[in-house]
């Protein structure tokens, strides 16, 4: 019988390959909840491991295929990638078990692909070419850190090859689990919070799984109790929840997003504490100027979150930057109209790339002299993030944070 974990991992990877789904959504679906904890862990490791190392896996597999690797159909390609990942990085799994499961899964798809899959996996299990140090040493640097060539070259030019290698390697390690606790939940014990050996945070917003970089962004606004704040692209709601805890009952936080479904999920998680709206932040805002602070955490490439969403590095193309930048500037210009004189506007992304970051802010400031740059606030214990240009940047590396960018601006006049 085929392992339930491998069967589901194959289905998840197929859906991701279609370009319409993301790994984190699929791995938090009802199908995962039907598996035992052990199988959920195995499914998660196979999916994330295969996606993170896809470039390196393809480099090993391509020479073993009689047809050009680019022409191999997606079903056998995915089966071979996920099986190679297990052979290479999951020694506790017997070779025969994963090979047999891969062949049976191939048979279930028809098209005679089982013979192709079986032949390559038998060769891999016997030869294990990745054990040859010269084999990997001679690979291009972007292959060794499993990055697309365009992204490697871009980072190597910006930061140098050593830093690019460090960032690429960091992106292939699982993200560190980070939680945000509300004041009401601080008294919870860790054993209550994380039962057994799995991570199962409470689905209320008293306890929320949230990367440290994402938690830092709302604090950069420097908001205080009683402030009126708008989180313009708020879903899934983690940053809005932090702003709500800062502004308190005497303040007001408006959280909006483009899609009704995302706002409804956010409303369910946030228990109706905030004012929520469905609106397109790129269109003229339905508010008059009067917000003390506005957070524009805009839609972006997500290239700073590749540890959590590794499919992005294989899906995103640099040709997409101009359209993204155009929308980001439109959002910033639209929401800026709602900031009162003396109020604050924070622009942020979970991207590492200048087209979405510095270039957007500099374009906005050139055409909006009523705003000026300001050094962001930092929560206690968090220092050293603000550069000489007053921008805040983090990159994947030794801290294992996501990569993000933030720029704070003050409205000086009308």
Image: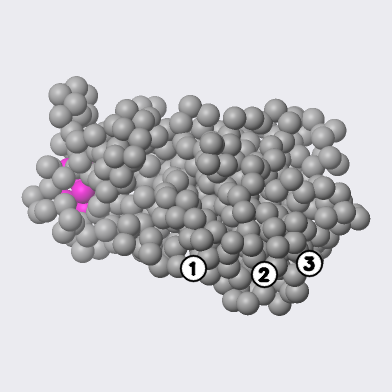
Label 1: few (<14), some (14–19) or many (≥20) C-alpha neighbours in 10 Å: some
Q: Where is residue 386, by image quadrant?
A: top right
- In the image, 110 versus 318, the foreground residue is 318
Labels 3 and 1 touching (C-beta < 8 A): no
Which residue position holds label 3?
Answer: 290
Q: Position of residue 409 (x, y in %)?
A: 63, 53
Disc number for residue 337: 2
Q: Position of residue 19 (x, y in %)?
A: 38, 63
In the image, residue 395 sits, relative to residue 257, either above or below, namely: above
The residue depicted at 70 percent of the width and 48 percent of the height is: 221
Reply yes or no: does residue 122 show up in magenta. no
Real-space Cα distance between discs 2 and 1? Answer: 16 Å
Question: For the residues carrying marks 3 and 1, which lies nearer the camera in this image?
Answer: 3
- In the image, 237 versus 356, the foreground residue is 356
The residue depicted at 51 percent of the width and 32 percent of the height is: 400
Q: Where is residue 194, by image quadrant?
A: top right
Labels 2 and 1 touching (C-beta < 8 A): no
Residue range (magenta): 114-121
Which residue position holds label 1?
Answer: 327
Real-space Cα distance between discs 3 and 1? Answer: 24 Å
Real-space Cα distance between discs 3 and 2? Answer: 9 Å
The residue depicted at 68 percent of the width and 54 percent of the height is: 410
In the image, residue 47 sits, relative to residue 196, either above or below, namely: below
First of labels 2, 1 by sequence position: 1
The residue depicted at 29 percent of the width and 32 percent of the height is: 161
Q: Is residue 194 left or right of residue 69?
A: right
- Colour mode? one colour
Indicate the secondary structure of the residue bearing disc 3: loop
- Name, please, the residue furthest toward the left: 66
Label 2: few (<14), some (14–19) or many (≥20) C-alpha neighbours in 10 Å: some
Indicate the secondary structure of the residue bearing disc 2: loop
């Amino acid at each position: 019988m085929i392992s339930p974990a491998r069967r589901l991992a194959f289905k998840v990877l197929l859906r991701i390959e279609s370009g319409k789904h993301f790994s984190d959504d699929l791995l938090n679906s009802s199908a995962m909840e039907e598996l035992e904890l052990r199988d959920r862990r195995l499914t998660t490791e196979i999916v994330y491991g295969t996606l993170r190392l896809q470039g390196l896996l393809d480099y090993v597999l391509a020479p073993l295929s009689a047809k050009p690797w680019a022409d191999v159909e997606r079903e056998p390609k995915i089966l071979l990638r996920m099986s190679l990942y297990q052979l290479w990085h999951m020694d506790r799994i017997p070779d025969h078990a994963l090979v047999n499961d891969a062949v049976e899964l191939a048979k279930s798809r028809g098209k005679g692909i089982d013979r192709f899959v079986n032949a390559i996996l038998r060769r891999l299990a016997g030869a294990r070419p990745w054990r040859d140090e010269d084999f990997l040493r001679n690979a291009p640097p972007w292959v060794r850190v499993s990055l697309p060539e365009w992204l490697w070259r871009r980072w190597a030019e910006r930061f140098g090859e050593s830093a690019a290698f460090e960032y690429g390697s960091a992106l292939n390690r699982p993200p560190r689990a980070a939680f945000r606790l509300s004041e009401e939940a601080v008294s919870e014990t860790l054993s209550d919070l994380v039962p057994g050996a799995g991570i199962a945070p409470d689905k209320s917003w008293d306890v929320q799984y949230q990367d440290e970089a994402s938690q830092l962004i709302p604090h950069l606004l420097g908001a205080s109790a009683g402030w009126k704040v708008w989180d313009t692209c708020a879903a899934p709601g983690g940053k809005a929840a932090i702003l709500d805890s800062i502004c308190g009952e005497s303040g007001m936080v408006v959280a909006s997003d483009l899609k009704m479904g995302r706002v409804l999920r956010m409303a369910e998680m946030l228990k109706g504490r905030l004012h929520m709206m469905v609106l397109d932040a790129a269109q003229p805002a339905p508010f008059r100027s009067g917000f003390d602070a506005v957070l524009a955490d805009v839609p972006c490439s997500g290239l700073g979150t590749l540890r959590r969403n590794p499919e992005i590095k294989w899906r995103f193309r640099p040709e997409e930057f101009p359209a993204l930048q155009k929308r980001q500037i439109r959002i910033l210009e639209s929401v800026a109209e709602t900031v009162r004189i003396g109020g604050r506007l924070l622009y942020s992304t979970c991207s590492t790339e200048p087209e979405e970051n510095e270039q957007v802010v500099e374009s906005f400031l050139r055409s909006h002299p009523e705003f000026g740059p300001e050094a962001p606030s930092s929560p206690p214990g968090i220092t050293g993030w603000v550069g000489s240009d007053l921008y805040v940047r983090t990159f994947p590396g030794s801290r294992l944070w996501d990569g993000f960018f933030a720029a704070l601006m003050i409205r000086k006049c009308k």
